[in-house]
Amino acid sequence: MANKIEPKKTPMRERSPQVRVKDFNEVPYGYNDEEAIREAKRCLQCKRPTCVQGCPVEIDIPGFIEFIAQGDFTSAIKRLKEKNILPAVCGRVCPQEDQCEKVCVLAKKFEPVAIGRLERFAADWEAAQGESPIPQLPESTGKRVAVIGAGPGGLTVAGDLSRFGHAITIFEALHKPGGVLVYGIPEFRLPKKIIYGEVDYLVRCGVELKLDFVIGKTATIDQLFEEFDAVYIGTGAGLPWFMNIPGENLNGVYSANEYLTRANLMKAYLFPEYDTPIVRGKKVAVIGGGNVAMDCARTALRLGADEVRIVYRRSRKEMPAREEEIHHGEQEGIIFEFLTLPVKYLSNEYSWVKSMECLRMKLGEPDASGRRRPVPIEGSNYITEVDTVVCAIGQSPNPLIPQTTPDLKIGKWGNIEVDEKTGKTSKKGCWAGGDVVRGGATVILAMGDARVAARSMHEYLTTAVW
Amino acid sequence: MYKVLRREKIVPNIHLLVIESDAIHQNAQAGEFVVVRADEKGERIPLNLVDWDEKSVSMVFMEIGTSTRKLAALTAGDEIATLVGPLGKPTEMVQGKRILCLGGCYGIGALSPVIRAYKEHGNTVITAIEARSAFLLYWQEKLKKYSDEFYEITRDGTQGLQGHVNDFANEYLRTNQVDLVYAQGCTYLTYLTSETTRHRGIKTIVGLNPIMVDATGMCGVCRVIVGGETKFGCVDGPEFDGHQVDWENLLARRKIYLSDEVYSLSFFECETYG
Ligand SMILES: Cc1cc2nc3c(=O)[nH]c(=O)nc-3n(C[C@H](O)[C@H](O)[C@H](O)COP(=O)(O)OP(=O)(O)OC[C@H]3O[C@@H](n4cnc5c(N)ncnc54)[C@H](O)[C@@H]3O)c2cc1C
Ligand SMILES: Cc1cc2nc3c(=O)[nH]c(=O)nc-3n(C[C@H](O)[C@H](O)[C@H](O)COP(=O)(O)OP(=O)(O)OC[C@H]3O[C@@H](n4cnc5c(N)ncnc54)[C@H](O)[C@@H]3O)c2cc1C
Ligand code: SF4
Ligand code: SF4
Ligand code: FES
């Protein structure tokens, strides 16, 4: 049996690095029908599939893959959507190598089944068939739920609860729904039309979407309770961190959030056709080593930079970014400067950043996260020229809601504290999940939290027991 | 989409914009602002709230670049793509104080809800507004309603006192006791005001206008240095103690996109007028 298995994943065709760095179009093409079927046939259809335990929302992985293997794509997508309302998104951005694919039995000897690519295939196939029909809507329960934040978490809660017949209104601060999927993750990794398509489907299913509505300002949570029976807080972790080093407020020094929001949400790469500008630096340094840093670096390249470097204080092994992103970045010519820490930005006579002073680091003892702690090498300071810096060192939850909701219990990082099993906050009728609880995490974890909360919310709405 | 109920030129280059909204009024307070986006391709820009009720919000804006040009071209019945608010912290209220309130250009409009609130809280309000010339002063009657004393200043002397607000403030503070100074308008005006009151040690609150994008504390472009600490203008402000503000940094940061703005405007004019 084993010798019949193709050891490697069916490759996914992608655009060549030289071509793709010139625009914002998506990098991989996705499988066609034959490729998908070929890859699906690599799955052993395990009786006790380990892959399912690796997926935070427990998708029936062998189930949907078997349908693909049989060429029954309609059933494949149906099976996927039982557990995941955003398969086109997760197929693209889930850290599969740390989740479902990591524990696929094939991974012991060979490459695992390309679960993410198959998921993406099924979802894209469905989208290509045109507008999906609306399911039969259940009878209304008369209960109203307010969902705060239209990120993957909020959208999942809305989808789940509307299926039970509750009336849902999503309140979103920005002028577009999607959360980080729209303002943060770039078009070349996740085309916006995928998310808008999913949101449109929710709206057709009767979910009300109120954009340009900031909870904590336009209305507080307590004001929402005058109209709604329950509230879900899925506001993400949108407050950017800075390092508090000299020169960080110079012109040309960005937070990742500003840089990506200008480029993605505001479409600054199409300036001046779109009105929002962005600095098109020639020598760009991106500080940090996660997905956010990789997205900023690859965006800078596409905005026409000659040289983009990732400056990270640990080594490549500790980089939290997904392997696929690092690989794509390397192909595109991003320079990696490991074991390096900026300590100061220097200015030209117009208050623009012109260079940065860095320190070399070495790895010391492991810290609380189990990763070896970087320690500065005395006297290793050096200065390097830059004209744009993007600081991508992390973010925490926005304080607007905590500040205006006194009875909400908040943790030390500004995160909302919840009961893990239900997603309940300290405030009656109020649930939370995703990045606002975890700090910067992942799309699928936000969706998993949302699913747990939706179940608990439904119970509360039908029994009134808190 | 949000319906424009009214857009009219008040004086050259300065317009009133009234937009339909049934949500913003319920929590709106003096000193807060909204973000608007004229159309799908537009930039998000902040404008102070000057008035609000169950059906609408009003702003006064100065026509400068592409975004404000687009707004200036609106007529009743048109729609804009984004309207969100109220945003920012409201003006901190005090009671029973003598407050000198200064405003110029769009800040004359932006001053009106603030002096009204000060007045309603039992303060004595001394208002002074500045423009380049008499024909650019506006809303005198409206502002007088909430002012115990009212002064006009023009740089060319065509109306009221000649000079800048800070010349007036200097004079006024020499002979009158004042507990608090409040200034609203362009950065130059708020800066000059702060420098004028600094050595007298009179607390001075200024409405700042750093560049913004989301205006909810998400991007950090609006950072201003206040008392040596980095603050986010949109959520920690936009009003700050003028004596604590790092003006050099603020003035520099407002120029980040200067050349882009000029380019954007010439592109817009070319697209619009051929
Ligand atoms: C650049 C970048 C790249 C990433 N790449 C990956 C990846 O490859 N794979 C992966 O799994 N994860 C990735 N992540 C992380 C992932 O995007 C997040 O974990 C996920 O989006 C969290 O979902 P959420 O629903 O909790 O919140 P968010 O997606 O943050 O959405 C929150 C929404 O709430 C809105 N909101 C906030 N405050 C208010 C308020 N007061 N009132 C109304 N609305 C409000 C926000 O505007 C936003 O739209 C990335 C993150 C970033 C920033
Ligand atoms: C809290 C706050 C309240 C404000 N209230 C008012 C008001 O009531 N009336 C009014 O006329 N103006 C107000 N402004 C200023 C107004 O936002 C800018 O004049 C406007 O953005 C200019 O846009 P533009 O495209 O027409 O001009 P541009 O040509 O783009 O820019 C002209 C100048 O405006 C500033 N600016 C540009 N883009 C932005 C932006 N996205 N956010 C902030 N500033 C920017 C820049 O410093 C620039 O030098 C306020 C600003 C802030 C921060
Ligand atoms: S949702 Fe993510 S973890 Fe789950 S099967 Fe899909 S790719 Fe794997
Ligand atoms: S563990 Fe791997 S081989 Fe087994 S069912 Fe899951 S995907 Fe298929
Ligand atoms: S405008 Fe983005 S944080 Fe203030």
Image: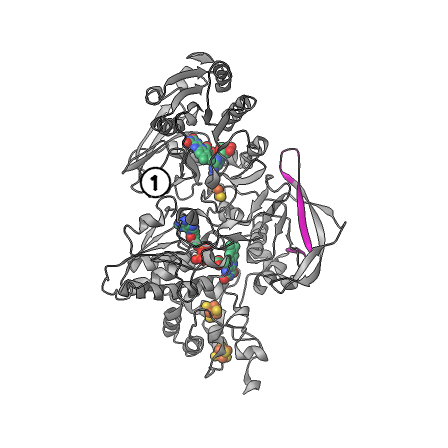
**In the visual, does A148 lie left or right of A18?**
left
Q: Is residue A341 above or below residue B5?
A: below
Q: Chain of mark 1?
A: B
Q: Number of marks in the image?
A: 1
Q: Is residue B27 above or below residue A24?
A: above
Residue A132 versus residue A406: which sits nearer the camera? A406
- In x, y percent, where is residue A414? 49, 52
**In the visual, does A170 lie left or right of A87?**
left
In magenta, the rendered stretch is A334-353
Asked whether A350 falls inside the magenta stretch, the response is: yes
**Secondary element type, mark 1:** loop
- In x, y percent, where is residue B52? 32, 34
Which quarter of the rendering shows the C terminus of chain B? top left
Residue at 75 percent across and 50 percent down: it is A380
Label 1, on which residue?
B27
The answer to whether residue A242 of the structure is visible from this angle is yes
- In x, y percent, where is residue B101? 43, 23
Which quarter of the rendering shows the N terminus of chain B? top left
**In the visual, does A58 lie left or right of B257?**
left
